[in-house]
Amino acid sequence: MPKIEKLKSGSYRMVLNLGTVNGKQIRKSITGASKKDVKMKALEYQALHKSPTGDTIGSAIEAFIQSKEALLSPATIRGYRNIQRRLSNDFPKFCDTRLDAVDDKKVEKLILDLTAAGLSAKTVRNYYGLISAVMKYKKAYLPPVVLPAKTRTEITVPDDDVVKQIFAAIKGTELEAPVLLAAIGGLRRGEICALTLDDFDGNTVHVNKDMVMGPDRKWIIKQRPKTFGSDRYVQLPEAVVTLIRERGYVTNVSPHSLTDMHRRFLQAHGFPAFRFHDYRHYMVSSLHAILVPDSYIMQRGGWMSDYVMKNVYRHTLADQDKNMVQLANDHFGALL
């Protein structure tokens, strides 16, 4: 047990050494009114940050996933299972490590190995996120480490001219209703694929379900959308709703099939390549450009807050923000 020292304030302090990160020591300061108080706090801290059992990382991951299967979405559980399989197959030595033997060097080596295997910074962070959640679940200590820096993903947002041409080219095809719902209504793939005619009331669609792939890789309808804010009502142009009612359905394909159909459609017609999800970027960009309030864009797209929307779409909104700044400066410049 480290030495307990008395401070000038009259209280006592103990400093625990938690390991090193890139050669820098990481310490935890424990203070209390007496030596006995500090010692008790230190023992409690160490007990909470070490595994009381002989669990390994591998067994702890399995226990954590099983405990969350009834609480988290099938897509999240599937992602956890994918990480679990990769770690088990490619990093068995790490998975066999006891929780109370995990140190910064082992975690840093795993991160370096994952990066060397070609995983993106975001994916490596997802791996660390699961391990961190597992260690917290088991009340085991996970040393701090340096993670790969986040990188900004470059996206392609179609402009009005391209979207207008696409609207003309998709008439009468299986893609027509899904593309209109994505580009005009801002719906996600899974939300579109889960829709039925019962979700429409007049020109308003109630987005309240999501089609997701379960851990067994089968598509299922989740009776709640991606987030609380995603449960929303979106009013659509009458022409869009009329089209869907005349068809008698929205779409009969899965989100993955929808993506493949869209990719082949763009290639066949010579349109620039972009993701189906980028229609949501297009909607945000278009509404922002015509000065629609952010609060309405947020509600239409199903974001919990404008912070989340702007954080996700900051690259999409950058050009429009520059235009607004110029407009404001031109106005005040004229007064001068």
Image (cartoon, helix red, strand yellow):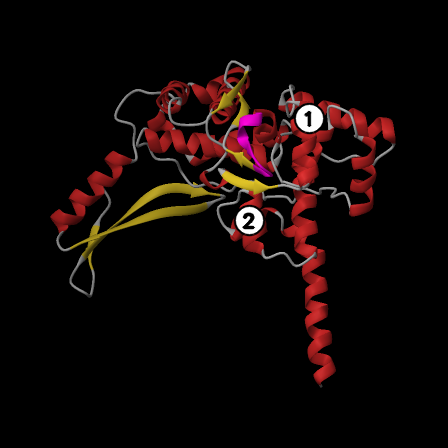
Decide which of 29, 192 is in the foreground and name it: 192
Disc 2 crowd rating (10 Å Cα; few below 14, some 14-19, many 20+) is many
Residue 278 seen by the camera = no
Q: Circle 1 is placed at which residue position?
A: 246
User: Residue 62: percent from the left, percent from the top?
Assistant: 40, 19
User: Which segment is the magenta one?
Assistant: 195-204
Decide which of 282, 92 is in the foreground and name it: 282
Mark sitting earlier along the chain (2/1): 1
Query: Mark 2: which secondary structure?
Result: helix
Image quadrant of residue 243? top right
* Residue most extreme to the bottom: 336
The circle on residue 298 is 2
User: Residue 286: percent from the left, percent from the top?
Assistant: 70, 50
Amino acid type at image mark 2: Met
User: Residue 51: percent from the left, percent from the top?
Assistant: 29, 28
Picture layout, residue 292 above or below residue 175: below
